[in-house]
Each structure stands twice: as structure tokens, then as C-alpha cells.
Amino acid sequence: MNLQEAFSRLKAALNISQHKRLLQLETALPSATLVVERAQWRENVSGFDQPTALAPLIATVDCLSTSAHLELKALIGEQMSLRVMCADSSYRTFHGYVAEAAQLGSDGGLARYRLQLVAFTHLLGLRQDSRVFLGRRADEIISTVLRAYPQANFRLELSPEALADAPVRGTTTQYRETDAAFVTRLLSEEGWNHRLDHSDDGKPLSEAKAAKHCLVISDAQAQRPDLGALRFGKPDVRRSGLPEDTITSIALERSVQPNAVTQAAWDARQLAGVSAEVRSALDGGELPTLEIYDGRGERRFAQHAQGEDTAHSPLADTQAALALARHELAIKTLHGDSAVRTLTPGANFHLTEHSLFGNQPGRDDNQFVVLSVQHEAANNLGSEAAQLLKSTELEAGSYCNHFRAAPAAATLVPPHIRKPPAPGVQTALVVGHSSDTVTTERDLRVRIQFPWQRGKAPLAGGLSGPLTPGQEETGHAPGDAAASQWVRVAQASAGANWGAIFVPPVGTETLVEFIDGDIDRPIIVGQLHNGQDAQPWPAGVDSGANHPGTLSGWQSRNLDGQGSNQWLIDDATHQLRMRLASFSQGSPYSELSLGHLISQGAKSSQRGAWLGSGFYAHTEGWATLRAGQGILLSCSSRPGSYGSAQGTQMDAQEAVAQPRRCAPWKT
């Protein structure tokens, strides 16, 4: 038989319907255009094999086709359904989108293709964003993110208790994170699980507007699917050539884990610490207390209520219990191999006919929950195709999987995903109500907007927000008091009824740091001059000033922007001076200068002509000098030390001496 004849026979063997195939692939292409040769796919609950990726399904499918001219571009993004025949001849379906397509080669008109199928959540890993959500629960934020994708099909199965425990988050920031990383992190922080439901509605792929699989988000108390009893035994080949649905090997793994968790944080609003402590009730034998203590700064356990972020003790209790549940889940892990084609992540099963499990009355040590499954299968293409392809397993087909499970009694919670640390110091502009020059509250906090926030009113040079499929803007830069929660402002000094007070007006550029490196907990540590606003006394290159920068001090700005209060310090060599001044459009100019007196305009940085030395008091309005105990004005000099003249405050001996010297001339 020559090569051309062999390929003709192979074409004839493959160019039949997919009826009764172990593996079937439904596509929008004509039937049997692609025939599955073999496939490998993995699925998980809550990302137990890939904690940081929202990837509940990844499948690699090798296909054979009698056409070597399938356009790969047309395959990308198409939804396909991989089906595997179960022991009862029914089919289990896995739906996914084609993320990668490759032609592995062709010869004589026969071509091999490799397709990678993924869940719609794969798309979330291809979009990165920076935005701020205010005063919302995690389920609301997650729903907002997912609804931006036309392919999204998701369902929330959260108990009323879980929603009641979910805090209203004051600030939740997605900063340079992909949507997949952001959603996965929120699920981890709340202790919510996610899995895929591949229930087949029977409709053709051509009619599907969204994903045919559904992302199910549930809490630890949600009811799990039950696979029933799964038998342990040696591989047993049936008449069809496939092994019976049994678990063929098991390896039990135990590890020592922390058995206590203590978490604490400071609350600046209550001036008190908020803490929670939990200990494991599991039998730890002779182990000592192995505590994980995690103490943090302010606002860690803050819950947004009535416009305020205040510490919430029940939230601390929930977070501590969640951390302990993660450690308890890792104590006992089951690894196994099986031929059970219905093995599903997130589902319970009880193991039978094993010598080490389920043999002691009153103990449920044979009850497990599946965490992840890695499937591998070869199709039953028949003897002629198997012979021509030189792969004996392709004659009757083969299937096996490797799975990971945990005790069903354990609290099923997702792996811990640490929040990305804030990227150092950032700048932000103070924002407020449109009619206010200063927007603040009792503790002199302000609201800010970062340059990277997109929305209806971004900072100068910023961008508007992207549009959702419903053409709704998703930006989070309103340019007003709704841009952030209240942010504390560090002062030069602060204490109980003492210290410095400076409230940054709207439009002030500030320097922002983050408590514990948490981008959701900003704090203003300074203010910055920029190129948009003139400085009080500019100096140096391009300033036009006649000095290198000897002027310093403090200057406020009137609420109407037309005047100031100022304290100016001049450190020019041998010409030291200081000036207090107040001026505005509606009140006269007033000034008190000390030291080396020169001419200088109220709004000028130019050092003018010398006027003399001493002190200079001037006002364009009324002046009053009043003292209840007396006033002493003297032109007599008196020796002193460190700038203070000798004598008491009202010592007027020089003035008294003058009339006494005139006494002899009295008539």
C-alpha cells in the first residue's frame, strides 16, 4: 500500500460522524471537520492548582482534519464544546473558547490541529485597569467587573449569612491589576469559592450569545454537588476497552500547620485597637500552640457605614476564622488517580472498598471534596485509524485523570492571595464639592483624586472611562468629593488640643503614602508646589527674582483667592528680617516687619531698597494699641544680653531721671 493510498484510507476512516466516539468536539464548522485525536484538560475549584489566575478550565485538544486549509484566525475566539463519553454512554460536556490554535503539520491532505480551550474568565486576564470603588460590597464590585464582558455568564450562590458578613468596603482599589487578578483577590479576601458549571442547555453553539459554561461563585456554606460512592480498585477493562469508573490509586498527605490565628489593627477613629483570636478545634496531638500573629496599622478592619470607615470587630473575627480555615484545609490532602469521568471540582464523594478509609464506625474519614482534576484521554478512532496513526490507544480509546481532594468536613475556602503592595509614594489632587474652596470635616480630612483615575472629570491630561457593552461609562474619576473616602492629613505637629493646623484647599497637589503598603489606606504626608500655580516667593532660574532663594516662610490663601496671611523670613547675609502681613481685596493692608527693613510688595518676591533697621508697623486701616496695666515706649538704649535689655518690663528709670534732672530749674 503506497502513501497516497494510506492517507485515502485514513480519510475514509475519519470522515464519518462523531457518533459513539469517546471524545467529541462540537464547533460551528460542518460536522466531523475536526475529529479529536486526544485531549488533556484541567479544572479546579477556586484555583487550587493556579491560585493567582481565574482559570477554572484549560484544555488542549489535538484534532485531525481532512482539510489542511482551515483558517486559524476564524477559530480564535470561537466557542466549542468538548464531550467525553461516560460509563453509562451519556456525555459529559466541557464548554470553552478557543484561545490558541495551531496547525501542527499536514501531509497528503491530512492535517493536525491543536486547540486550547479556556473559560470566558481567560479574557479577564487580558485586560488591565486602575480604578477605585467606593462604599460597595465585594459581590457588587465583582458583578460590575464581569458584566463588562459580553461573554460573561455567572451566578452568585451566596447564602444570606455570607452576604450579611460581607463588609461594605470603604475603598477598594484596582491598581494596575488585570480584571482576573482583581476578581480572584476579592474572592480570596471574602473567602468565596468559584467553579464552572458546564450544564448543557441543548442549544447549538451558533445561538449562544454568552458562554455556555457558567461561573458559579459560592461561600463555604453552599451546598456542594454529590458524586455519591466511588469504588477503589484495580483497573478493570470493560468490553468497550475503557477501564471501569474506579479510583485506582490514592496517596494521603498530612502536614503540620499553624493552629491559632490572632489579628489586630489600630483604629484612629475610636482610638483603640481591634483584634480577633481563634484556635483550631482539631486534634493536634502534642503540638504546642503555633500562632500566626498579624498586627497591622489603622483601617485594616474598617467597614463603611454612614459615610465613615470605622473598625468592625465582627469583620476581624471573620478574617481570623478565614485564615485559620485555610491552614486547616491544608492539614490533610488526598492525591489520586482514577478513571471516573464524572469527577468534578467542588463536588463531594465517599470512597468505598478501601482498607484505610471508612472502616471505623462513627467516622466519616472516607468523605472527600474534589479540589482539582487533570484529565487525559485518547479517542476511539477504530483499528484502521489507530494502525495508520501508529497509536494503539486510539483504537478503543483511553481515559484517566489525576485529582486532588480534601476532607469533606473541612471548610472549603480559596487559597490566600496577597494584595499587591502599593507602588511607593504617589501624588494626588485634593477635590471637593463644586461650590467649596475647602471640603473637610471634624478631623480635618480631605478627599483626593489620583492622576491615573479615569472618568467624567479626570485630572488635567487624564482620560475618560471606557464604555461597557451597554455604553455606560465605567470610569471612577468624578473630579469632586465622590472621588475618594476621607483621607487623613499629616500635620507638622499634632496632639490633644495643640499642634499645627493646615487643611489643603481644593486643587492642592499632595504627596500620598499608604498604611502598611495598602493602596486602599492612603494618608497625605505632604503638599507639593507645581507648575500650574505660582509659588508665594519664587526664586532661582527663570523666576525673575533678584536673589537666589533667601526668602522662606508660610502663606495662606483666602477662600476667595484674593488675599493672604503671610509670615515671611528673609535669610540674606547680614540682612535678616521677618514680616507678618495680612491683605485681601476687602480689607486694608497691614504689616509688621522686624530687622533689616526693605521695600517688598505684598505679592512680590523682589527684594527692594533699604528702608532702615529695627521694626516697622503699618496699616492702611485703623490701629489700636491698648494695655490694661500700662504702656512703655522708650527711645533710650540699655545694655543687655542675648537681645533682651536689662531690667523689668515697666522699668522707666531713664524717663524718670530726666524730669528729676530738671528739678533745680523749677521756680
Image (tube, rainbow, N blue to C red):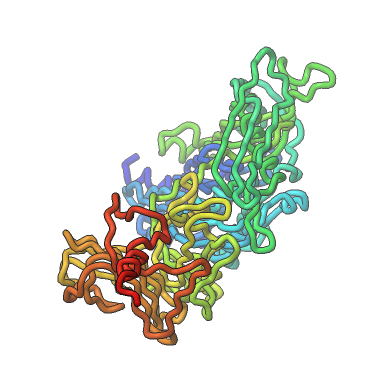
> Which quadrant of the figure contains the C terminus?
bottom left
Residue 251 visible to an observer of this rendering: no
User: Is 101 on the left-hand or right-hand side of 542?
Assistant: right
On the image, the x and y values in percent for residue 502 come to 46, 63
- Residue at the spot x=60%, y=42% of the render? 265
Residue 569 visible to an observer of this rendering: yes
Vertical order, 288 against 237 (above or below): above
On the image, the x and y values in percent for residue 500 come to 47, 58
User: Is 594 on the left-hand or right-hand side of 355?
Assistant: left
> Which quadrant of the figure contains the N terminus?
top left
On the image, the x and y values in percent for residue 652 come to 38, 63
Q: Nearer the viewer, residue 661 or 394?
A: 661
On the image, the x and y values in percent for residue 115 come to 44, 50
Q: Nearer the viewer, residue 480 or 400?
A: 480
Vertical order, 600 against 203 (above or below): below
User: Is 329 on the left-hand or right-hand side of 120?
Assistant: right
- Residue at the spot x=23%, y=60% of the render? 571
- Residue at the spot x=59%, y=27% of the render? 337
Q: Which image quarter: residue 85?
A: top right
- Residue at the spot x=52%, y=79% of the render? 434
